[in-house]
Amino acid sequence: MRVEPYMDLFDYQRENHMKKQAPLAARMRPATLEEFVGQEHIVGESKLLYRAIKADKLTSVIFYGPPGTGKTTLAQIIAQSTKSEFVQINATTSGIKEIKNVIDDAKALMGMTGRKTILFVDEIHRFNKSQQDALLPHVEDGTVILIGATTENPYFEVNKALVSRSIIFQLQHLSRDNIKTLILRAIQDQTQGLGGYNANITSEAADFLSDIANGDARAAYNAIELAVLTTPSGPDNQILINLEIAQECIQKRSLNYDKTGDNHYDVISAFIKSMRGSDPDAALYYLGRMIYAGEDPRFIARRIVICASEDVGNADPHALMVAVAAAQAVDFIGFPEGRIILAQATSYVACAPKSNAAYKGINRAMDDVSTVQIKGIPHYLKGSPTPDNKNPKTGEEYKPYKYAHDYPGHYVKQQYLPDELVSRIYYEPSENGIEKKIKENLDKLRGNRAND
């Protein structure tokens, strides 16, 4: 480690101690792209970001994604590989004064040496408008190359002008295989990891921690570090991390729930069928099971929305409104409070009167679309009838379109289906909930059309 001229012996020793005692997640942070795990969609060898980092030709970028997915790590890799000056600030602790100091230093460096400055702003969404405005002109003129990191959608939370001058790279939750790779690497690493503890981990424990981390590398590192540091050695002087120890360290029991396997589909199937079968207790149990196992809340919300339309339908149109609002609210609020929102939507859909009439109706219609050849839709329904309202081939005058609101009850007898399908019925309302009233009204209208 190189000692800066202004660093005294105590500063040097303090920094050394901090590095040795830093959390495992900090110690195991990769220094090169080759050591980086995950995010192949942006740092694969053929990808733009990989090429830009390797060629040291980076332009302003914003890394956007959940915690523990590698945003800061990528910034640090860039710091290690670039010839530019690299400066890091945190938006939660830095103000306009710090920004101005960075800009002044960047201008001086450019003037004296021609070297550029890369400014990494962690949690950039926390910059207020004046702070972002202070930075903007210097990003525009190239005084600094901006690297922003945020867990929030930059299109909503970051100055639009800064976003428009940056390439947005969205990082995703790490896969279970990615997390397992990191856990095993940490267990074996003799220099920065836990290799000196003579520790080993069972396959079941590694799988459990990989799953429970929910794509967050930092959470996985914290769990395995706690497990190793608190587990006594066995008779063979080896620390063995088994499933029981892993569950105890993270205070969570293992469930037979694989987010990519058969059990995943079994549980979501039971969840949907419980809502369809009007059993809110069973539906809430399976919801809790999915939440406990770390299922993606957006996946759960989508299934509730589908069920609200497919299985409740017009028997209670409010069910779809509740489900869609829940999906939006969960995305906005996040967990753990998001479980309450999902529970409200689940119980509402489960208790609502049921009808699959709309679902069956669109299936029938799609069957006819694919199998019945029609000559055309009625002329008076078209958007651009002929100027004289006559058939150009026969000269016969077309029937005029009848505007329903000009007639009593806002209804007028008129053919809407093509001739070939004129007798078809696709939507058959049930006798449940609001759809019973819809059925009564529709039966009257269809009776009128039949007598036309």
Image (spheres, rainbow, N blue to C red):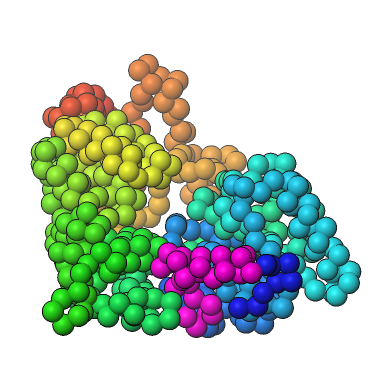
Rendering coords of residue 283 (x, y %): 15, 43
Range covered by the magenta-colored residues: 9-35
**Residue under the image location 46 percent in, 33 percent down:** 401
Residue 234 located left or right of residue 159: left
Residue 301 placement (x, y as % from top left): 31, 46
Q: Position of residue 50 (x, y in %)?
A: 57, 78
* Magenta highlight: main SS: helix
Above or below, comparing residue 175 to residue 327 in the picture: below
Q: Can residue 385 be found in the magenta stretch?
A: no
Tell which residue pokes out farthest to the right in this image: 111
Figure quadrant of the N terminus: bottom right
Q: Position of residue 331 (x, y in %)?
A: 40, 45
- Residue farthest toward the front in the current orientation of the protein: 9
Q: Is residue 30 a member of the stretch shown in magenta?
A: yes
Q: Is residue 233 above or below residue 255?
A: below
Given residues 245 and 53, the one toward you in this image is: 245
The residue closer to the viewer here, 445 or 246, is 246
* Residue at point 24%, 38% (across, down): 343
